[in-house]
Image: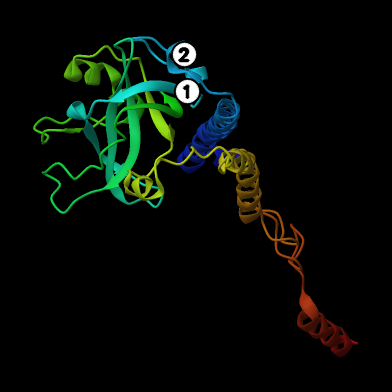
Amino acid sequence: MYRFLLSRQWVLLTLVALLLIPAMVWLGFWQLNRHEQRVERNDLISGSLDAPPVPMAELTGVGGAVDPDDRYRPVTATGVYDTEHEVVVRQRTDADGVVGYHVLTPLVQADGTGVVVNRGWIPAGDDITRMPEVPEPPSGEVTVTGRLMADESTGTTGIRERSGLPDGMVMMINSAERSEAAGVPMLGGFMELSETSPALAEAEAAEQPEMLPEPDHTGIGAHFAYAVQWWLFAAGVPVGWVLLLRREVKDQSPPAGSPPTGSPPTGSPPTGGADPGPVAGAASGAVRAGSA
């Protein structure tokens, strides 16, 4: 009855089913891992943002790298802005997704070290081949507070360096590159500005670059739902295979009440003798009556 399972069609169907089950289970665990990473990231950001501000030099050093656990920590630095080595970062968006630039201005501290400060976002001008107009930073010594961020690279952002950019434009934020360009030893990483002291006048503050919002740390996405979905798909594969098997068996089985293959039809005469039938019996009786 089940010899059809050896057919090419069923062998291929079974092999596909056996491959789909582990693949879907793996995809489910992959989505679960993405969910756990998102939850861990949200916890990291939330804990970092709630930490008290500390001097940036306590969490990173000249030419050093930012510890992943210190990302988004509030940090402070005091110094004077170096507008001569100010640059803008191309292809950056604001909170509404509008493409523009991020403004990077080094802040030189009293000990001679510098801090790369991301002062915020400005819109792109009509001509992207020219340096846009950048609002002047506060003059004199200021104390800035912001979120500690790690240096960007192609590996962490997917952004590639481009040659031939207009003067004053870069593709990524990297303290080592800014240090080389400015000739100032820079602390590793950079700061996303959130506050300036002394505070700017309202009119002056309105002209400054748009400060970047805090990173989202509330949403967890739909990764967990996708994981459950993949596991349900994996469970559905053997169920579907069994249903197809039952239908194939039903299609190949003879209808109910039909005689087995090779048996004589119902009402046929028994083997070894002929059934005379009613007409022949009546004729035989008439012959016997005439003889009498």
Residue 243 placement, left or right of 113 = right
Query: Around disc 1, counting alpha carbons within 10 Å, would you say few (fewer than 14), some (14 to 19), or many (20 or more)?
Result: many
Quadrant of residue 175 within the rendered picture: top left
Say if mark 1 contacts mark 2, CB within 8 Å: yes
Residue sitting nearer the eye, 101 or 21: 101
Q: Which residue is mark 1?
A: 75
Q: Position of residue 124 (x, y in %)?
A: 23, 49
Query: Residue drawn 28% across and 31% down?
Result: 104
Numbered disc 1: secondary structure: strand
Callout 1 amino acid: Val
In the displayed orientation, state which residue is furthest to the right. Answer: 292
In the displayed orientation, state which residue is furthest to the left. Answer: 164
Quadrant location, the N terminus: top right
Callout 2 amino acid: Leu
Residue sitting nearer the eye, 152 or 148: 148
Numbered disc 2: secondary structure: loop
1 or 2: mark nearer the eye = 1
Query: Residue drawn 45% across and 23% down?
Result: 76
Q: Is residue 264 above or below residue 14?
A: below
Q: Which residue is mark 2?
A: 59
Query: Residue drawn 39% across and 45% down?
Result: 201
Q: Position of residue 96 (x, y in %)?
A: 39, 52
Residue 16 placement, left or right of 181 = right
Q: Is residue 25 above or below residue 259?
A: above
